[in-house]
Image (cartoon, rainbow, N blue to C red):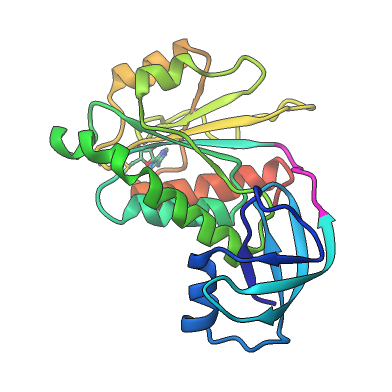
Amino acid sequence: MRRFFLSPDVEISDEVLLSKAESHHLTKVLRLPVGMLLQLFDGRGHIHDAEIVAMGKQVRLRILSSVYVEEDGVPLRVCQGILKGQKMEFLLQKCTELGVSEFIPFSSSRCQLKKTELRKLADKQDRWQRIIDEACKQCNRPWPMKLGTVISLEEMVLQREEARPGILFWEEEKEASLHTFSLPADVAGLQIVLGPEGGFSSDEAEAARKAGFQVLSLGPRILRAETAALAAVSIIQHLIGNM
Ligand code: SAM
């Protein structure tokens, strides 16, 4: 069943009006007919089954039934060194699909973006949020992944919450790995950190270790940043029972 985003500000009564943007997608792109059934979600856990009753700049829908889905599972926060080009957008989409609860982009010494590009990253927040919202729609996720603003590696390391074990995946770590990692029994959340294309310097890995992060290897091969992120998220989500 097709899903559309309904702003959480819309008061739910027998009938609701879809936003102009979503109405345009429904009428002009998908060309759905009156009478068709679809789902509405508000990104706050509410999911409504609805029927199209009238077309227009704002499509009118009759609410047939509503459910509320609690946010569940152990939250996983992914901190990702800023990547070039489309790779960040790819990771935002995949981390949403994989159930990551929060995504924090950070800049570090080996980020391969120029200073001017780093300064412009704030302009990408809206686009990045749209990618998350679209991925939520596609994967039927009632609560969107939270997106943080870009911070520095130093700030990110300092922000690690005591109650939330942190893992920094370092390509130069030779000893410790997920095989040696034991998940605390009643873990309330987990934070994983992955580097940019240029990786982490020894000083950065050391600073994270001092701040209480476990520094682990993902095996003997050097993975592309986006491969490492997907592999680490998939393994950890399985370990904490979200996949
Ligand atoms: N510039 C580095 C090099 O060529 O050695 C590679 C960095 S890798 C492209 C980007 C990030 O992916 C790393 O900082 C790390 O977080 C993660 N990563 C890739 N391979 C890894 C491995 N074998 N073990 C742990 N982390 C890895």
Task: Tell me, yes or no, whether the highlighted magenta stretch contains residue 189.
Answer: no
Give coordinates of residue 63: x percent, y percent: 79, 68
**Residue nearest the viewer, comparing 113 with 185:** 113
Give coordinates of residue 17: x percent, y percent: 64, 66
Q: Quadrant of the N terminus?
A: bottom right
Residue depicted at x 63% and y 89%: 33
Q: Is residue 32 above or below residue 74?
A: below
Residue depicted at x 46% and y 49%: 129
Residue depicted at x 66% and y 57%: 141
Say left or right for 105 vs 134: left
* Magenta residues (range): 68-74
Give coordinates of residue 221: x percent, y percent: 37, 47
Would you say residue 242 is visible in this rendering?
A: yes
Ligand 1 quadrant in view: top left
Residue depicted at x 40% and y 43%: 220
The secondary structure that dominates the magenta segment is: loop
Asked which quadrant contains residue 13, the reply is bottom right
Asked which quadrant contains residue 165, the reply is top right
Would you say residue 114 is visible in this rendering?
A: no
